[in-house]
Amino acid sequence: MNTSIFRFLSLTLLSLVVVGVSCTGDAPPNPCTGVQIDIVYATTPAIGASNNGSITVFNPAGDSVSYKLNNGAFQSTALFNNLAPGNYVLTVRNNRGCLDTAQISIVNYGPKYAQVKQIVAGYCGPCHLNAGNSGNKNFDTDASIVSGWDRIQVRCVNGTPTFMPQGGQLTTLDKQRISDWVMAGHRISD
Ligand code: HEC
């Protein structure tokens, strides 16, 4: 068979297919095509053996927006609490009915570490949090607190050469909390 005939046949077939589609009527454009929802959320860890982690969604927000976790039902509240540690799929539905998802982890903190994390969050900014990197120490991540455990103890509990937070001192109770965490093994799980 001559190749040009072959090409003619396949072009004919192709146009038939295209015509066939347009004859069925155009579907309305999908309002969600190309829509990407900027999902903004915060989590709190589950502490110890209590399943008390949480997820709060800040965006999207509004009357007609709804949220669900894993295969649960959609809800209008942007808060999920009493969560066990683990991985979750958050689905959001915006005011046009468009869906998007985010993969979210709830971490597990040991009770002693949770207290140290709270002390750092309460007393070590702005010098060591966010953009703060005084003395070449930034404590934004759990890993940086865990690896800095000895310096945190020396500076906050022993006060050598001077006490941290700079210009003051933690309470006796908070110093004890740091010592307890260090004695327990200075891990996230302690
Ligand atoms: C107002 C600012 C400020 C605050 C608040 C502050 N620091 Fe510091 N920190 C500094 C400065 C400045 C240095 C560097 C000078 C020095 O080492 O004294 C430093 C250094 C450090 C170092 C590294 C030096 C070393 O000895 O290893 C550690 C660790 C540290 N701080 C821990 C903490 C902890 C933990 C907190 C909170 C409980 C805290 N700091 C709060 C200002 C601050």
Image (cartoon, rainbow, N blue to C red):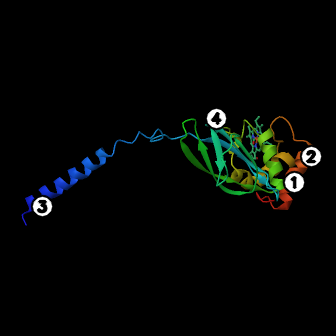
Q: Residue 179 carries which label?
A: 1
Quadrant of res 99: top right
- Other residues around mark 4 within 10 Å, as few (<14) / some (14–19) / many (≥20): some
Q: How far apart are marks 1 and 2 (CA)?
A: 10 Å
Q: Is residue 144 placed above or below 94 in the rendered structure?
A: below
Q: Quadrant of the N terminus?
A: bottom left
- First in residue order: circle 1 vs circle 4: 4
Element at label 4: loop
Amino acid, disc 4: Ala
Q: Residue 6 carries which label?
A: 3
Amino acid, disc 1: Ser
Amino acid, disc 3: Phe
Outermost residue on the left side: it is 2
Task: Work out whether residue 8 or residue 68 is closer to the camera in this orientation and state it.
Answer: 8
On the image, the x and y values in percent for residue 146 come to 74, 55
User: Mark 1 touching mark 2, by CB under 8 A?
Assistant: no
- First in residue order: circle 1 vs circle 2: 2
Q: How far apart are marks 2 and 4 (CA)?
A: 40 Å
Element at label 3: helix
Nearer the camera: disc 3 or disc 1: 3
Determine which residue is flagged by label 4. 61
Viewer can see residue 137: no
Q: Residue 101 carries which label?
A: none
User: Mark 1 touching mark 4, by CB under 8 A?
Assistant: no
- Other residues around mark 1 within 10 Å, as few (<14) / some (14–19) / many (≥20): some
On the image, the x and y values in percent for residue 120 come to 78, 44
